[in-house]
Amino acid sequence: MLIVFTITVFLAAALLFLLQPMFARMLLPMLGGSPSVWNTAMMFYQIILLAGYAAAHLLVRRLGARRQVWAYLAVALAALLVLPVAVPRGWLPPTESNPIPWLLAVMLVAVGLPFFTLAAASPLLQRWFAACTAKDPYWLYAASNLGSLLALLAYPAFIEARLGLAQQSRWWSVGFAVLVVLLAITGFWKRQEATATPVSPAADEPIALRRRLRWLLLAFVPCSLMLSVTTYLTNAVAPIPLLWVAPLAIYLLTFVLVFARRRLVPHGLMLWTMPLVLLAMPWTMSGLLLGLPMEPLDVYVVAHMAVLFVVAMVCHGELAKDRPPPAQLTEFYLWLATGGALGGVFNALLAPLLFPTVWEYPLTLALGCALLPRRVAAEHRKWPGNIAWAALLGLATAGAVFWLQQHPVSPQWLHYTLMFVVPTLLCLAFFRRPVRLALCFMAVLAATMWPLWGRVRTIHLARSFFGIHQVTHDVLRNTHSLKHGCTTHGIQSLDPVRRREPLSYFSRSGPLGEVMVIVPEKLKRHVAVVGLGAGTVACYGEQGQQWTFFEIDPEVERIARNPRLFSFLADCPAEVTVALGDARLSLEREPDGRFGVMILDPYNSDTPPLHLLTREALALYRRKLAPEGVMAFHISTTHLDLKSVLANLAQDAGLFAVQWMDFPNRERRARGDAPSRWLVMTPHPPSVERLAKSGYWKPLRPHPAVGLWTDDYVSVFRVWSWGWD
């Protein structure tokens, strides 16, 4: 019986957490590869998880053993009818309104019932096991989270790398059918049938409301923090399952560790470690909240993963210490699920409306500090003293940091130690007072950030479903820059003489400039640009030409058309139109063979949406391209080797391709040029031959180990890199 129950719980959890990245991966192309797809999906999953836990609680409270089993198996069999998992046909996202309602509706129709069935499995099975054996069933919660963890790690490393989405869905359906059989076996286990009886609420010792609310907050903080770290990574690198999985895996690992039969990590150690790991936060968060480059990336990733692990260990450890008897197990899990669902709603729905950038991250950390066990009586009631100490420390830190900005200290590590580490160390004086520690942490974080706005001032900050957009004014260089996450997506000089000069990756002395010079004038009559950004490439537009920009985010178009921010579109002598919506869907509506030049520069922070780099996407581009036309791909991503992907696609499509990795010299950098990598494809050999004569463009070699990317198969695991090669 022990083996059967363990396998069933393990399989249910594994299927639950395989479904999450698999279906989000199916939806990602339809929403332009937006990082918000994952956070919204996680919110949906948390809400359905809450519904599953609530259903399990009601079944145990209201029905006898046999009826519990029959009711649950009826739901499981109904879920089999909606398999295999797939996006419903004909469902297209809106182009000009918030897509969250559409996304939630699609998920409810496609995976709502199977996910609900899996969500209810763990608490029900644990309750049935307790009824059979009269033993503590909480260790099964550790087994459940272990199954979830292993499934998550397997998805990017093995499943996504070897199976297409259609194959993944079919095998998942087989696993669900096996689970239904196991559920029937465990449900009708003869010993369970003989001993299990409905639990009367009156027989349980009542749980105080304050204790329930503490459970809720202790569940809320790790969930919200996990989503905040995910937002951080996907905005900085790429919205891909590989980076979705890591924070969620750490989140689940903490459950495994704290609910295991033997405590593997001492809870006291985590309590003492948590304030120490927060020392890194003012330094690392300045990059996230101000749009500064996150280099070296591995250091940032390790720092934020460590904070997530320690804070989750503390919160989940407090929950494990305070768990009730097995008779109240389903209610305990119900409150945990409520806290997780509220964390998902806060991060996915409320935070984008309330905050222009990722302020939910430090706020959740501060709440985690406040939930540390109190060592001073009635400390939470001493608000005047807590606020006064936080204000004093914040003002002192702001003054010290402002002085350091005016009088830099050498070496640089000492400068940053004085600016970031010393103020945070002062917060540790209040370790015994959690509320005061939380307020001081927020004060120090705010104080260490505001002086950084001196030379580079933010003049516009907007947050949409597709990301965080920040326009800054560099006072010394007299330029405006558009940043998405931590990546610059366009720079314009405010000098009237250089106002129409393309800078950064798009300079006239770089790869794109050479392409636009070599391409015959007849091919430039109709130009398509996938990805608007600040509109920089419109500098190449000339009178009599028609330029069509394809952009998924309405906020980006508003920024590009705002003359107070950028004037590239307004200054362009060509006829300029912007087609809103996913580029592939918008391009389908264009006549075949229309465009002589296609510039593909669609970026979500540092990486292009991957569904725009598949065999089907390239086939679409070819149909819209003139017979002698040229496609120029901008692939200046730091962390993915996309040239190998495109080399394989070019070979598969029979296209000629060359690439140029441009490293500007000091003189060009002073003018505003930036390193970039461009790749040109064309079905017309003379176009490539003209580029090759310059000496900068090099032919591409296919990479069989990378495989051929399709809409059904994409493996980021095989092209991941920590920097340009």
Image (cartoon, helix red, strand yellow):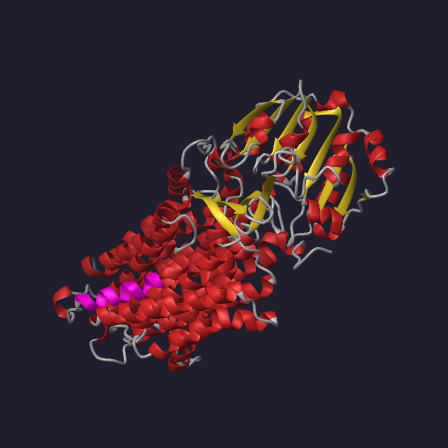
> Please, is residue 155 above or below residue 252 in the view?
above
- The kind of secondary structure the magenta stretch mainly shows is helix
Magenta stretch holds residue 61: no
Which residue appears farthest toward the left when viewing the image?
202
| The residue positioned farthest toward the top in the image shown | 544
| Residue 1 in view in this figure | no
Q: Quadrant of the N terminus?
A: bottom left
Q: Position of residue 504 (x, y in %)?
A: 66, 44
The magenta segment is 209-221
Of residues 452 and 273, which is closer to you in this image?
Answer: 452
- Please determine whether, in this image, residue 273 is positioned above or below residue 383: below
Could you say which quadrant of the image residue 683 lies in?
top right
Rendering quarter of residue 591: top right
Residue 96 visible in this rendered orientation of the protein: yes
Q: Is residue 382 above or below residue 354?
A: below
Question: In terms of image quadrants, where is residue 368?
Answer: bottom left
